[in-house]
Image (cartoon, grey):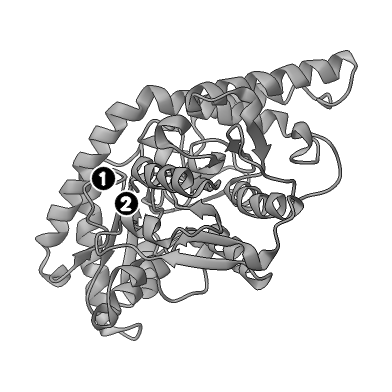
């Protein structure tokens, strides 16, 4: 690994003693932090230390109690970062399972309360992560009416648009806190206020769910300030070892288990809890809390530098920034470059040593970004096919920005000439 101890500038040693020959590997520049975060030092240390607690936390012997104590210490630490009660957190395997438990769990709870699918209505933003959209597609297949709210041209889900979609039968709304492709931070507290006013007027209950993604890296994840009933955390997006996440379910947020097999996690998630991974997530969040303000300011400056460098490159003329709302994740930039094949451009950049993405990795196999497509009309459909996502992180600096902008200009020129060039 590089001097920073992360994935970002990894280069192989010049000599491999086991193979007895010299290897030359070009230096790598990692610009896909939104796709996968390197594990932080604190999270790695906490994870490795917790591996010593090998007992099953459900057992009554000393080893089991030690493991259970470590698990609950992690739960309390995460709850403190969210300013919620520890009992309101359920450990899950990551963001996808957390979203499934929130959405499908809310649906199952409504069904258990006697409501039929055809009497239920739900709302989701049209630019959600695939794990959210596929949950809504599933309940729609069972007869639930689902309304998808589109963003405005800036990528914002407007509170009034959500309010207009609410009905007497609405039981669930899901709006991601910050979009993982374009970086727009959604006005959750304003959306929550519209939902609460609707509840009061109609004397009904509507749950508000938010997929938090990487937003906690750069904004305080206080659930009550956001106004949400359900909040999904994904450790792999926050510097924790992958395979761990947490779902916050506030008091009165009725959800039912979606898995069978045991009574762990207060009956909400069966299976032996991943104690070491939970410890890693807690440590990662503590580190995030310490660095949030300074890193947000630093990366926001680099993002603006990158936008300026792109604007100055002749071969990148006409490039459009996707998502121009005032509130943005400071590390993420989505652009559409006219006339390019985005996958070819990304592969060309990869050969030059730069790792970027075209869209969410969970949309692998699709040629265009559904998020960018939702921002523009038919006349600008090219933007979804020519979108690139660059996400900055701890190893990003001014020289990296300059080098990447030059490489991007070259890749764009190559892409326009085509693979045979």
Where residue 408 appears, x then y in whole percent?
25, 63
Query: Does residue 245 appear to the left or right of 270 in the view shown?
Result: left
What SS does tag 2 mark? loop
Name, please, the residue furthest toward the bottom: 420
Give the spatial CA distance, label 1 vs label 2. 6 Å
Label 1, on which residue?
Answer: 327
- Say above or below: 270 vs 176: above
**Mark nearer the N terminus (1 vs 2):** 2
Which residue is labeled 2 in the image?
Answer: 184
Q: Quadrant of residue 322?
A: bottom left
Question: For the point 39% across and 30% down, which residue is it?
Answer: 220
- The mark found on residue 278 in the picture is none
Mark 2 Cα shell of 10 Å, populated few (<14), some (14-19), many (≥20) = many
Question: Circle 1 sits in a helix, a strand or a loop, which is it?
Answer: loop
- Coordinates of residue 57 in the picture (x, y in percent): 81, 25
Classify residue 76 by image quadrant: top right
Image x and y of residue 75, in percent: 63, 25
Asked whether the beta carbons under mark 1 and mark 2 sit within 8 Å of each other, the answer is yes
Q: Which residue is at a point 56% across and 62% down the rendered structure image?
A: 121
The answer to whether residue 279 is above or below residue 137 is above
| 161 is higher (above) or lower (below) than 254 | below
């Amino acid at each position: 690994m590089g001097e920073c101890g992360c994935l970002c500038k990894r280069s192989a040693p010049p000599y491999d003693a086991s193979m007895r020959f010299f290897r030359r590997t070009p230096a790598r520049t990692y610009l896909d932090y939104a796709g996968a975060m390197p594990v932080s030092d604190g999270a790695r240390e906490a994870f490795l230390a917790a591996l010593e607690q090998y007992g099953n936390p459900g057992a009554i012997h000393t080893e089991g109690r030690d493991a259970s104590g470590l698990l609950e210490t992690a739960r309390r630490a995460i709850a403190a970062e969210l300013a919620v009660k520890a009992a309101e957190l359920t450990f899950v395997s990551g963001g996808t399972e957390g979203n499934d438990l929130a959405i499908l769990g809310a649906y199952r709870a409504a069904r258990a309360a006697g409501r039929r699918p055809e009497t239920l209505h739900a709302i989701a933003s049209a630019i959600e992560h695939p794990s959210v959209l596929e949950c809504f597609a599933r309940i729609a297949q069972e007869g639930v009416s689902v309304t998808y709210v589109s963003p405005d041209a800036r990528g914002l889900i407007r509170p009034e648009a959500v309010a207009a979609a609410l009905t007497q039968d609405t039981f669930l709304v899901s709006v991601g806190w910050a979009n993982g492709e374009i970086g727009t931070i959604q006005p959750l507290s304003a959306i929550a206020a519209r939902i609460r006013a609707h509840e009061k007027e109609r004397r009904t209950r509507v749950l508000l769910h938010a997929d938090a993604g990487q937003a906690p890296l750069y904004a305080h994840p206080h659930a009550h300030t956001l106004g949400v009933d359900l909040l999904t955390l994904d450790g792999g997006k926050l510097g924790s070892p992958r395979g761990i996440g947490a779902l916050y379910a506030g008091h009165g947020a009725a959800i039912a288990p979606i898995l069978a097999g045991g009574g762990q996690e207060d009956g909400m998630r069966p299976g032996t809890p991943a104690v070491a991974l939970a410890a890693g997530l807690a440590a990662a969040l503590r580190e995030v809390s310490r660095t949030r303000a300074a890193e947000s300011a630093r990366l926001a400056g680099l993002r603006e530098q990158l936008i300026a460098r792109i604007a100055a490159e002749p071969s990148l003329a006409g490039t459009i920034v996707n998502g121009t709302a005032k509130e943005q994740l400071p590390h993420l930039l989505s652009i559409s470059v006219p006339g390019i094949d985005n996958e070819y451009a990304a592969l060309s950049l990869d050969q030059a040593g730069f790792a970027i993405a075209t869209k969410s990795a969970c949309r692998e196999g699709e040629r265009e970004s559904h998020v960018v497509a939702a921002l523009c009309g038919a006349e600008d459909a090219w933007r979804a096919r020519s979108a690139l996502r660059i996400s900055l992180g701890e190893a990003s600096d001014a020289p990296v920005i300059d080098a990447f902008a030059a490489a991007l200009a070259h890749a764009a020129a190559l892409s326009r000439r085509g693979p045979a060039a």
